[in-house]
Amino acid sequence: MGKYILKRLGYMVIVFGVVSLLMYSLYNLIPTDPARAQLEPMKSTLKPAEYEQMYQELRSQMGLDAPLLVRYARWMGIVKDVDGTYSGLLQGEFGYSSFFKKDVVQVIVEPMKNTIFINIFSTILALAITIPLGIYCAVHKKSKFDSAVQVVTILGYSIPTYIIALIFIFFFCVVWQIFPIMGTKTAGMVYENGWQEFTDKLYHIALPVIVMTFGSLGGMTRYVRAAMIDSLGMDYIRTARAKGVKERIVIYSHAWRNALLPVITSIIGWFLSIFSGSVVIENTFSLNGMGKLYWQGLNNFDFELVLAIQMFYTVVSLIGMLIMDLSYGLVDPRVRVDK
Amino acid sequence: MSNENKKKGFFLTRWFKRWFGPRQEMSALEEEQLQSPIRTIIKNFTGKKLSMFGLIGFLAVFLLVLIAPNYLEMDLGYQDSTLSNIPPTMNMMKVPSELKGNVKKISPGTTFAIGVDNDGEVYSWGYTNVAGGEMAHIPEEVQNAHIVDIAAGYDHAVALDDQGELYVWGNTRLQQDMFSPEMRQAMMKGGDAWNIVQLEASNQFSAVVTADGNLYLWGNGNMADIKVRKSYQGRIKKVALTGFAYVVLLDDGTVAYAGYKDKDSVLAKLPAALEGKKVVDIAATSQNAAAVTEDGQVVVWGNTTKGEKDVPELSSKPIDIYGGRYHYTVLCENGDVFAWGDNTHGQSEIPASVNAGGDIVNVYAGFFQNYAITSTGDIKTWGLRGYLCGTDDLGRDILTRIVHGGLVTMTVGALAVLISTVIGIVLGGLAGYFGGAIDMVVMRIAEVVGGLPFIPFAMILSAVLGSRVDTTQRMYIIMVVLGVLSWPSICRLVRAQILAEREKEFVTAAKAMGVKEGVIVFKHILPNVISILLVSMTLDFATCMLTESTLSYLGFGIPLPTPTWGNMLTGANNSIIIQQYWWRWVFPAAICGFCTICINLIGDGLRDAIDPKSAER
């Protein structure tokens, strides 16, 4: 097991290297010149020759003249930067956001908290609804309720999230006026205690969470249902029933545990997709989250920030894949990952 | 299936029966004998009502976006502030029945019109809630007075009663109801000094011409030239208002620009064709003016962008000319009516019935509408009837944008699926058949690509690659990005299928016969997995359409003004649009959702039809 994890970790490092190199060179396709941008305000006060000399100096100072691979290695923190120190991703230096005029790490903290806060709620909520619903539908296959759920879930995964968001805003914010439309806190509100702050935040993220949950209901319910039907059709279920095992135990112990394997795969894949899915939700609801930050960064050509977030996404997805493979072994003893 | 069962009835009814009617029960043997696998699949598919609903729904949308763009032409640069945010209506020219046969005057405004009958009663119709003014709220004193003349402007209306009193309603926030001091003096004087012969209204300003040849203008003078040079006063016979200026017809039959902004106005440069000619009538559109000379010639000058200068061949001498926002309408001596200029809303396309009788006595044209009164009092109308799905913030027809946008969205989706399928088949085929190192490498690549968060990555690619290219190239880039990012699932599917197929006897046989390996993969094995591929292509088509529209919604897909179902919804996430301008998001969202639902229904149905095991689920 330990050897397998080590092997996977080594593989992850390689993939991360390849992806980061790809992304880095992708960004270098963009015709920007930070040295010129920094000198531009002084251009009118300098003579052309002076300007040119300063420009060249600044370029070498910023290390812009080095080949792509060297610059990449500096950015990663594998080789020494121009100033002779190691300052790259590996040292925790994620760069400087030109849009927010702050270090990327500082920019990311608050949105990251918000995103995780929202995603935890919506994930728990979605799992709490889809798994029982999927099991129920599988057990009562072809009943009226099941058919209705089937139709609703097709709607759920066919309609894009932003349209679901618009419809929900229309009903919850405009017609019934239950929830606020955007933001993460009541404007100008001074909190008396932490609990009040927490509930206010909950109140504001309620609608995004509902939309996110609703958007992911469709695919997940169908997945759980299909896996359950498959495992309910197995011979051991018939045997268990023939032995007179209680139906509840047949369903939850015999069938569900065997249906869990495919479900785990999609739960983790879907957990990751929530990070990217939140770009849409956070934009629609103007939530200060990672997705919104990413969108802002891209729109304002703040590429160091975008690159850092992209690396975060990549790491999350790589770790997710590792956890997925490892959890196979935990859930299903038949799968031996270290083989 | 017996012979007499075949070819009974019209083919459509037969199809309909086959799809929706009760299914014929056949014994297992009979079914086995009669049906090839393809026929079984078709039968299974057509037997399910939900999948057929999906197929018919999708075909309907598909045909709509394929055929309708030919009829609903779209000008990408088109915008018209006077037509922004109009809700769905088709009643803009529905004249109230009380007015029929009793018309004194009709004055069309932007999306509404007002009319007055011979009894002095005022009516309004169309979409009357214009730019903060409700035109349908006719003030009480207007209702009580005996109105003799009316004029409708961009967002206000003016009425004149038989006592010489002027009433203004609608939007009055920009001084539309502030009469100038000279006017007040003239009103006090009375008599010929306030005997109004012409009443006109335009873009937030209005004008009256009195019997003694004086012109008075009032209203919003911030943009418009509403001052009159003293030298012209007392000689003015008629005025024609453009959007921001006016021209006058003097009593000696010459035309003049009487305002103060004559230095930089193209309207002030009178055309040579008018020199030495006597003008009988003038009219103006929003940008230019036209004059009819005594010898029946129509001369247009000013900025002409919509073909206002292309005067058609007239059948006889024109006597009256009327100007809309971008078109002119003339009434000739013999009762024929001609119109030219912009025809976006059909305002210069005269219906055949108008010129058939030759008995048109009066024409009222303005903005986008035309009303012709026959000698029997009948009202014939042509021009802007309304919008089936409303308009957006730039005054563009939502329906037109939906059908054009659908074409873009579907093309992008289809080509992206094609690209991803080709990559998936080739790589999956290679990995599955050859295995070993190739398999290892391909599957690792697939894992990396599949593991990338889709939307953020597509956003980056689109932002990086799309920043230097035009719209068409950007469209191709989006297709390629979607295709290149979504192949891993197809690759995995093909690989798994081929792994199962390659051990079968027919492959061994082919190998024994010395068939090349490439041929075995793509000609012998692939046809066996094509049906499953079809299912995944259908489902991927829906996904690609969704992704494209999501990207466009976020602003990283196809850029405006090219419409797609996604970017039509950009900016719709605020409460004002969601509540007040509901048609701007409901229609694109509805058709986009409906289309993807239909495609998913087809895909699900196909999967059930192909794989009977999955149908049991």
Image: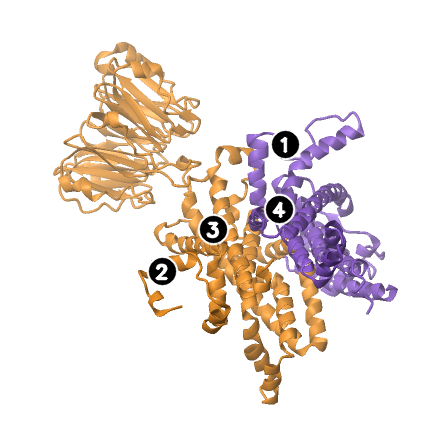
Chain colours: A purple, B orange
CB contact under 8 Å: marks 1 and 2:
no
Mark 2, residue position: B14
Q: Chain of mark 2?
A: B
Element assignment for label 1? loop
Residue position marked by numbered label 3 in the rendering = B562
State which quadrant residue B155 falls in: top left
Dot 1 amino acid type: Pro
Q: Residue furthest top?
A: B188
Looking at the image, can residue A67 be seen? no
Amino acid type, residue under disc 2 in the picture = Arg
Q: For mark 4, what is the residue?
A: A215
Tag in front: 1 or 2: 2
The three-letter code of the residue at mark 3 reads Thr
Residue B593, horizontal then vertical, whole percent: 52, 48
The residue that label 1 is drawn on is: A180
Tell if the residue under mark 1 belongs to the same chain as the one under mark 3: no
Instruction: Name which quarter of the figure residue B195 lies in.
Output: top left
Mark 4–mark 3 Cα distance, whole angstroms, equals 28 Å
- Residue found at x 49% / y 41%: B586
Q: Is residue A195 left or right of residue B44?
A: right
Q: Is residue B573 left or right of residue B311?
A: right
**Residue found 72% across the figure and 31% down from its top:** A200
Q: Residue B171, how many percent across, how many down? A: 41, 24
